[in-house]
Amino acid sequence: MLTALKTFARKSKISIIAYKIFDNVRLRREFRTGQIETQHGSTHQGKTTAESLDYINAQFADYLKYSGLSEQELKGRRVLELGSGDNVGLALRFLASGAARVVCLDKFYSQRNSDQQLAIYRALRETLPAANRDRFDDAINLESDLAINPEKLKCVYGVDLEDAAAGLSVDEGAFDMIISRAVIEEIYLPDGVFEATDKLLAPGGLILHKIDLSDYGIFSGGGMHPLTLLTIPETIYRMMASDSGIPNRKLIGYYRNKLKELGYESKIFVTSLLGQGTLDPHKETPRLNDDYMEATRALVDQIRPKLSGKYKDMSNEDLIVDGIFIIGKKPAN
Ligand SMILES: C[S@@+](CC[C@H](N)C(=O)[O-])C[C@H]1O[C@@H](n2cnc3c(N)ncnc32)[C@H](O)[C@@H]1O
């Protein structure tokens, strides 16, 4: 039934909107009745062990590269990872590099295959230098099953950060780093997350969030304009997105203002551009003719008259940004 509905919904903008509204109601009901298991976030499903390792290592390298931290500087840090999905490989990578503790918090529980997870962790362990391997072994025992050392790593599922923040603050104290990848865009009203992370962050602590600003292929996957998402009025969009984890439609300007409001020293790297894909290396200010062409701007002009509300007046430079990496440093006192 669900598959038939999905197939039908791919056909037109109206049917996609109707399907997403239906899905939003379904997911809200499921979450409220305690059904937190999803396939969403099962990033490693269908990946080979080598591909999973590449993914974990690329994430880790990204966090270091764009934060400007060296691996040695992770020593003793306390890390909170939001939306870790089906795998704690990244958390283990931080712990193996000397982080003191990692807490992974996910609103849902992504389905996973424990044999596959074990294979990924075993392979990850093999790639580590001896000192890192000792710290890895201190965090997780792979001998028989997955035995996590609760002193090093804790996983929390089924709760929003806003609801978990007070308890986390009492149980864990302050974090030195709060990180996420492909998570913030799924939170319909992310203001609460920034408030919560601000409270949980130690003075001088860092937030590092990689945020996908694309339409997740909802419309573009069916051959429609990649900004079709922004043509939907907010009152309707709320019914599609409040609980379903589809993109929240917050664009780069929202995050710029948020970091300013928090008083954080900050950088925002553009990771991806409309119709072009990844911008590698990511850049703070992509330039016309160097990083993107007139055709990209023309793509925005093509849909601008149809954009809804505030999107209509946004600059081309903001509308072409399809992904970002934000780095914010909380003032030291
Ligand atoms: C696209 S997946 C990304 C998973 C992982 N970070 C990765 O890069 O593979 C998004 C993850 O965010 C989680 N998520 C969605 N909303 C969340 C929220 N409000 N708080 C914490 N996690 C959330 C989902 O359950 C899912 O595991």
Image (tube, rainbow, N blue to C red):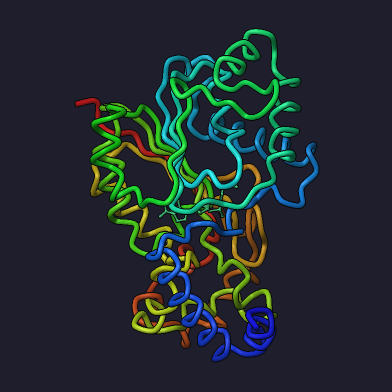
Work out whether residue 73 or residue 134 is closer to the camera in this orientation and state it. Answer: 134
Q: In this view, does 213 lie above or below 223?
A: above
Q: Is residue 298 visible?
A: no
Is residue 304 rendered to the left or right of residue 290?
Answer: left
Residue 75, compared with residue 19, is above or below; it is: above
Q: Where is residue 156 in the image (x, y as percent from the top left)?
A: 43, 41
Taking the spot 75% from the left edge, 20% from the top edge, the residue there is 126
Which quadrant holds the C terminus? top left
Q: Which of 304 and 239 is in front in this view?
A: 239
Closest to the observer: 230 or 287?
230
Q: Position of residue 327 (x, y in %)?
A: 42, 39
Residue 71 image position (x, y, % from top left): 55, 19
Residue reaching furthest to the top = 131
- Residue at 30% across, 54% down: 257
Residue at (52, 46) in percent of width and height: 181
Q: Measuring 41% from the left and 71% from the top, which residue is drawn there?
A: 29
Q: Is residue 320 left or right of residue 292?
A: left
Left or right? Give the position of 183 relative to 78: right
